[in-house]
Image (tube, rainbow, N blue to C red):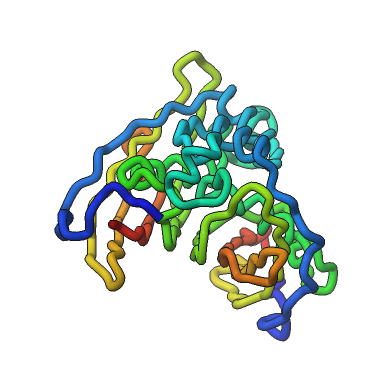
Amino acid sequence: MTAKISYADVEVGTELPAQTFPVTRATLVQYAGASGDFNPIHWNEKFAKEVGLPDVIAHGMFTMAEAIRVVTDWVGDPGAIVEYGVRFTRPVVVPNDDQGATVEVTGKVAAKLDDHTVRVDLTATSAGQKVLGMSRAVVRLA
Amino acid sequence: MALDQSFVGRSYPPTVPYEVGREKIREFAEAVGDTNPAYTDAEAAKALGHPDVIAPPTFVFAITFKAAGQVFTDPQLGLDYSRVVHGDQKFAYRRPVRAGDRLTVTSTIEAIKSMAGNDILDVRGEVHDEAGEHVVTAWTKLVARAAEGA
């Protein structure tokens, strides 16, 4: 593990660079193929509405994959992630237009732990609503 | 209908090995738009101390979720899979998944709860490599929403 951030240089409250991730219908089709999750709620508007959703929604695991990038881009080495967990609180609704949706992710060091690790608390919002809850990662720093 | 509590603690046999390929990792990294070179460039991964390209942190879910299918589709458990949504997901890593790994998953039912007519199922997937070393543990919480009028 070769994190580029030093444990000594971070404090509780240190903010990680925030990022905004775009997600369109094309993104969801590509993610379905790569992940093997072909649930039609992620690409078929008619089906999504029949099961009571407002529109096609992003895979929760897609949003989870995007959110951790705020941490992996910060430390450089994705292998420095020790733990990562989220709660899926609201869906990311992806309209069928050329804009799609965006997921905005922020992260902050919430605790300094043993063995050069820190806990980072993440927030992820889309259309002004929180889409992940209890989104936390433990990462090993240099 | 509430799920049978006697399934708590039940483990399912380890899956046949899943071989992690470099191009599958690349495909996944591209799908999430992540350009970190550790996922696609073996030299960059080695510079970070990894023997080969590594997979993004959530890559392993495709493997553990497929393994957990043994649980979800167990007719004796009787989960209504058509009403299932993903509630929580957590991973604890011993090391990152990397190209060349041959991974097996052992799924265990950790908890079964019933709340307001919803069935809540917690499944733990222990992922081991070919040498039998632990790589990552995945915890998946599924919620089967109550049927209308139930």
Q: Position of residue B136 (x, y in %)?
A: 56, 64
- Percent across and percent down for residue A69 are 40, 42
Position of the C terminus of chain A, as image quadrant, is: bottom left
Front one among B106 and B129: B129
Q: Residue at horizontal 40%, vertical 31%?
A: A21
Q: Is residue A56 visible?
A: yes
Q: Position of residue A101 (x, y in %)?
A: 44, 27
- Measured along the vertical axis of the image, is residue B120 above or below residue A53? below
Of B91 and A142, nearer the camera is A142
User: Which residue reaches farthest top?
Assistant: A98
* Extreme residue toward the bottom, this view: B6
Where's residue B3, x and y in %?
A: 70, 75
Q: Nearer the viewer, residue B5 or A10?
A: A10
Q: Residue at x 42, y 56 (%)?
A: A81
Residue shown at 45% from the left, 46% from the top? A90
Whether residue B10 sits left or right of residue B26 in the image: it is right
Residue A58 can be seen in this image: no
In the depicted structure, whether residue A55 falls above or below residue B17: above
> Is B89 located above or below residue A20 in the figure?
below
In the figure, is residue B139 to the left or right of A47? left
Q: Determine the image quadrant of residue A82.
A: bottom left
Residue at coordinates 43% horizontally, 62% vertically from top-left? A83
Quadrant holding the N terminus of chain A: bottom left
Q: Indicate left or right for B40 with A134 as reference.
A: right
- How many numbered dots are placed on residues in this image? 0
